[in-house]
Amino acid sequence: MNSSDKALVVLSGGQDSTTCLYWALQRFGADNVEAVTFDYGQRHRVELDSARTIAALAGVPHTVLPIDTFAAIGGNALTDASITPESGARADDDTALPNTFVPGRNLIFLNFAAAFGYTRGARHLVTGVAQTDYSGYPDCRENTLKALELALRLGLDARVELHTPLMYLSKADTVRLAQQVGAMEAMAFSHTCYNGEQPPCGHCAACELRAKGFAEAGVADPLVERFRQG
Amino acid sequence: MNSSDKALVVLSGGQDSTTCLYWALQRFGADNVEAVTFDYGQRHRVELDSARTIAALAGVPHTVLPIDTFAAIGGNALTDASITPESGARADDDTALPNTFVPGRNLIFLNFAAAFGYTRGARHLVTGVAQTDYSGYPDCRENTLKALELALRLGLDARVELHTPLMYLSKADTVRLAQQVGAMEAMAFSHTCYNGEQPPCGHCAACELRAKGFAEAGVADPLVERFRQG
């Protein structure tokens, strides 16, 4: 493979991006994958620790890039400690946005990933966004990402490719994919809980969605097992 | 006018964004315009002072938003003090990018402007980019911005409109527009020089391009006049 086959995975430390990282290792080869994590002032710093641990387990170069701009724009629950997050993802109402929504956050993550990838010779960008099982984050939908891909290609004058292997998978299918690509060991260190708890609280919307997916796939969640075994 | 007619101008403190700020005041009305400036670690801090002075002269609310990510990505002349900028804009070679190029910088500015505008109820974004008289910054071209506008509309689920009043104007026409919209008083405090000098050095590519535009329009540059009268 030459440098145009290098891939950069946006790794949040969650279940989906962990799956994507191992998907990318299969697709592009171990020597062609890097990961980037954004430190945007998220309340749950455990996400960054998860990302570091998972990148190390996967054996890929990992860069944490700061973004201080969201906190300066302010007024949202994920960066503003004075605001309490609502239940988050609400699959039953795809018109309402949870107050954890940072406007355009995913667009900005992918823009920075493209800029960073440009400097590293990585034109393939991999992100774990999905339309299925999610609330109405409009910047995670395929039509948004197709428009962004075009803007990035034109704006960077490079053949950027956005890969979204989970876009139309159910949570159960994502669990099955994680098994197929060998992500389960790392999955034990992924972070999902909206309340930032370890072991996960088990009752927030994110924990419930994750548990539902593992249950439907008939697979024990390695994260839950890790804490059960102490 | 209602809130959907509010506009946010991306104000760098340079000649073009100053012209756009006054264009926006005419187009949207004095009560409907705000300005945002990005502090991304640019070497010439005088740009931020220019932006503050110009916003104050125009009487518009002004916010400086930090972006620490470019410096972390590194390796470019505008944020890395160890790299010397090349001559910058090179109108004679539209394939070469000057090493002042931050990949996708303008895309990211407009993404953040859209996110900030979203929180302020401003769906009109005004930027001073132009295809004419410039080197090959691909993220300043109209096709890039049209794709980005679509990505922003879909990703924010809002009718974002990108306005680029200078897109196809020559530098001389931009000077004429600045006169028409009453931007000349503020223009005396705008900043252009690639070398960050005040008074401007007069011999860098940016100073030469600016001087050429004023000369072709047959107008004295208020910035030059201000220092001449000293």
Image: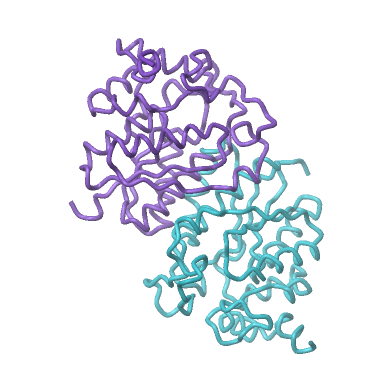
Chain colours: A purple, B cyan
Q: Is residue A78 left or right of residue A230?
A: right
Residue nearest the observer in this picture, A40 or B129: A40
Is residue A28 placed above or below B211 in the rendered structure?
above
Res. B180 image quadrant = bottom right
Residue in view at x 46 percent, y 50 percent:
A112
Name the outermost residue toward the bottom.
Answer: B228
Residue nearest the observer in this picture, A77 or A189: A189
Query: In x, y percent, where is residue A89?
Result: 52, 22
Res. A96 image quadrant = top right
Q: Is residue B177 left or right of residue B140?
A: right
Q: Quadrant of the C terminus of chain B?
A: bottom right
Query: In x, y percent, where is residue A88?
Result: 56, 23
Query: In x, y percent, where is residue A155?
Result: 43, 57
Residue nearest the observer in this picture, B99 or A158: B99
Is residue B127 placed above or below A203 in the rendered structure?
below
Residue in view at x 22 percent, y 42 percent:
A30
